[in-house]
Image (cartoon, rainbow, N blue to C red):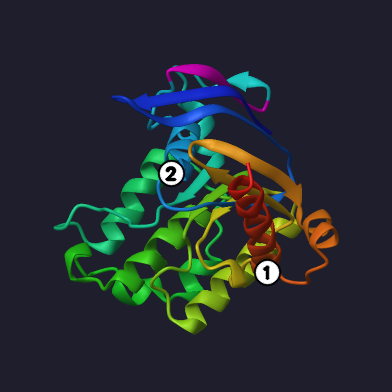
């Protein structure tokens, strides 16, 4: 579905992505995790065409995304912090995006679950962070994309809204869609993801299935398995 080969990106002297290789398939729900500044956001923005890599390639469904934009119609993106024109009303945002996407096959489940219709006349500048997240989630899923990229999707959501979103993610996973999730809350990933990609210092340290990760570490939680790997890696480096 998305194939990334030998991707590099520098901002000035800072090497943000360093020979990144990643191969993903339909039906995978992948957690992209790592410490702040490890390159996760730059990698996501590269996939979305918002950052142009210095070299390397990104293919979407077997075709290079370089100088292309149509492929983005097949991606639903939920940013960590949604930024919208302050003076536009919620309803205007949805109408604008519908006009851009030109897709009549709408998925209104989150729109209805989050009761977006009740706030369509409110200006975006008046919304709380959690309500803005609901708008972003509803937009990401609305157009039935083949790929969902969710950047810290539950950040700012109340527990009920968070559960509604996680249930929706599981439904889309069951449909065979490719889902990429970044999250610092590893405890939330246990029931959602099938693959773990761990990044550090602009590199992918490992890409493993959750089943293999738990088997290798003899842990039943993703957070504990990751912690054990990081601890063993740290111990190894300290003895070099």
Identify which residue, 140 or 239, lies in the foreground: 239
Q: Would residue 217 appear left or right of 207 to someone viewing this image?
A: right
> Could you tell me how far apart the alpha carbons at marks 2 and 1 are, in whole angstroms?
24 Å
Magenta-drawn stretch contains 57: yes
Image position of 154 (left or right of 130):
right
- Rendering coords of residue 237 (x, y %): 61, 46
- Mark closest to the chain's N terminus, 2 or 1: 2
Residue at image coords 46%, 62%: 138
Quadrant (top left/top right/bottom left/bottom right) for the C terminus: top right
For the point 63% across and 47% down, which residue is it? 239
> Percent position (x, y) of residue 216?
83, 57
Seen as rendered, the residue at the extreme left is 87
Magenta range: 54-61
Given residues 228 and 239, the one toward you in this image is 239
Pointer 2 residue: 41
| Residue at mark 1 | 224
Depth check: give the residue in front, 182 or 84. 182
Camera-side residue: 230 or 6? 230
Q: Is residue 213 in sight in this rendering?
A: yes
- Circle 2: element type: helix
Image coordinates of residue 92 in percent, x first then y, are 27, 56
Q: Secondary structure at mark 1?
A: helix
Report the side of 38 relative to 29 (left or right).
Answer: left
- From the image, give the main secondary structure of the stretch colored magenta: strand
């Amino acid at each position: 579905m998305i194939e990334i080969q030998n991707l590099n990106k520098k901002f000035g002297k800072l090497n943000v992505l360093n020979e990144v290789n990643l191969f993903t398939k339909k039906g995978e729900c992948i957690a992209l995790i790592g410490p702040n500044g490890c390159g996760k956001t730059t990698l996501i923005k590269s996939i979305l065409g918002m950052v142009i890599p210095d070299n390397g390639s990104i293919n979407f469904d077997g075709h290079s995304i370089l100088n292309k934009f149509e492929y983005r119609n097949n991606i639903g993106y939920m940013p960590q912090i949604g930024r919208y024109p302050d003076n536009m009303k919620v309803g205007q945002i949805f109408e604008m995006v519908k006009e851009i996407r030109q897709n009549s096959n709408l998925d209104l489940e989150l729109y209805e679950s989050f009761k977006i219709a009740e706030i369509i006349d409110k200006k975006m500048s008046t919304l709380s962070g959690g309500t803005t997240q609901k708008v972003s989630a509803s937009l990401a899923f609305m157009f039935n994309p083949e790929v969902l990229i969710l950047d810290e999707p539950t950040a700012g959501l109340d527990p009920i809204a968070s559960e509604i979103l996680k249930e929706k993610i599981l439904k889309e996973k069951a449909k065979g869609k490719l889902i990429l999730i970044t999250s610092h809350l590893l405890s939330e990933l246990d029931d959602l993801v099938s693959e773990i990609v761990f990044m550090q210092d602009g590199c992918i340290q490992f890409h493993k299935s959750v089943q293999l990760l738990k088997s290798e570490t003899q842990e039943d939680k993703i957070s504990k398995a990751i912690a054990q790997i990081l601890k063993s890696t740290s111990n190894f480096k300290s003895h070099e």
